[in-house]
Image: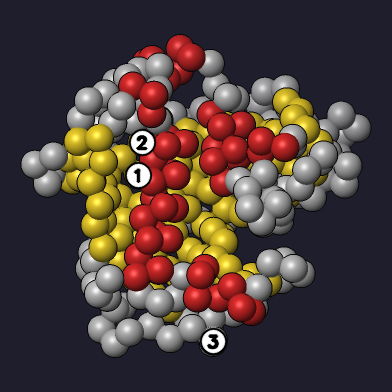
Amino acid sequence: MSAVAVYSEKYFLSAGEANAEQELSLPVLATKIIDIATAHANSLGIGNPDMADIHSGWVLSRLTIEMERYPKVNDTYGIETWVEGWNRHFSQRAFRIFDEKGATLGYARSIWMVFDTLTHQNVGLSHLHLPEGIIMEKECPIDRQRPHIPILPSPSDGHELPKNALTATVAPSFYTFRYCDLDSYRHVNTVRYIDALLNQFPLERYDSHILRRLELSFLHEGAYGMTVRIMRHDFNDRPSSALSICNAADGGMILFSRFTFRPR
């Protein structure tokens, strides 16, 4: 496969990949985004198969998806991806989601790192070499992620919250990661995190609102048998929520997320 700067694929949305509103489900969209990023990296000679001999592979560090509308069941849609930035620690990759006629449905931004599959430590990108002309200045007109913020229970002893921390506005939920939550690296799959976060809101929220923007910031790995606490803060002045997934044993944050909704 020849190296191209903008890599594109098209898909047919079957009922099995749709959500309760008969639209492309967010977990499936995230899967397609990861798949096309993988396919493009493989075509450039910098994919996981090219690093198997040094037991290294790509992992997602940040993901932002912003959609104006979603494909419907039986629609054909496409995704194109390109490398936005590259340094010795991370790669920045962007995506455009479009309909059958080529009209833009939304965009996504991501940050990737390469880690050692045995030690799970960041090994950097210095051993990889992009073909000339691959890094693009193609526009991706969505905001970059903002820093993550701790979400804590409301203090019951009169103590103040740490600066910039948010107070949970709903009771926390708990979940223990199981076999089907793991990926080939034996840590929790990105899509399983999205499932857990989406389930923090009732069906009625998705019937009345579209999830316009999702931000995911991965801070630590989730592992088999780990019980996590999911905290949520709903903002009063806008249809937006912040969520965190923390290790219930020590309180360490594994993932931070922002959801922004828009009425249908």
Residue at figure coordinates x 35%, y 44% from the top left: 66
Considering only order in the chain, which callout, 3 or 2, is on the residue closer to the N terminus? 3
User: In this rendering, is residue 63 above or below 114?
Assistant: above
Residue at figure coordinates x 36%, y 55% from the top left: 36
Q: Residues within 10 Å of mark 1 (few under 14, many from 20)?
A: many
Q: Amino acid at mark 1?
A: Glu
Which residue is labeled 3 in the image?
127
Residue 213 in sight in this render: no
Residue 206 as seen in the image, left or right of residue 115: left
Alpha-carbon span between mark 2 and mark 3:
37 Å
Which residue is labeled 2 in the image?
212
User: In this rendering, is residue 34 above or below 193?
Assistant: below
Q: Secondary structure at mark 2?
A: strand
Q: Position of residue 258 (x, y in %)?
A: 52, 41
Residue 66 numbered mark, or none: 1
Alpha-carbon span between mark 3 and mark 1:
32 Å
Q: Position of residue 97 (x, y in %)?
A: 26, 47
Q: Amino acid at mark 2?
A: Arg
Q: Residues within 10 Å of mark 3 (few under 14, many from 20)?
A: few
User: In this rendering, is residue 64 above or below 180?
Assistant: below
Q: Amino acid at mark 3?
A: His
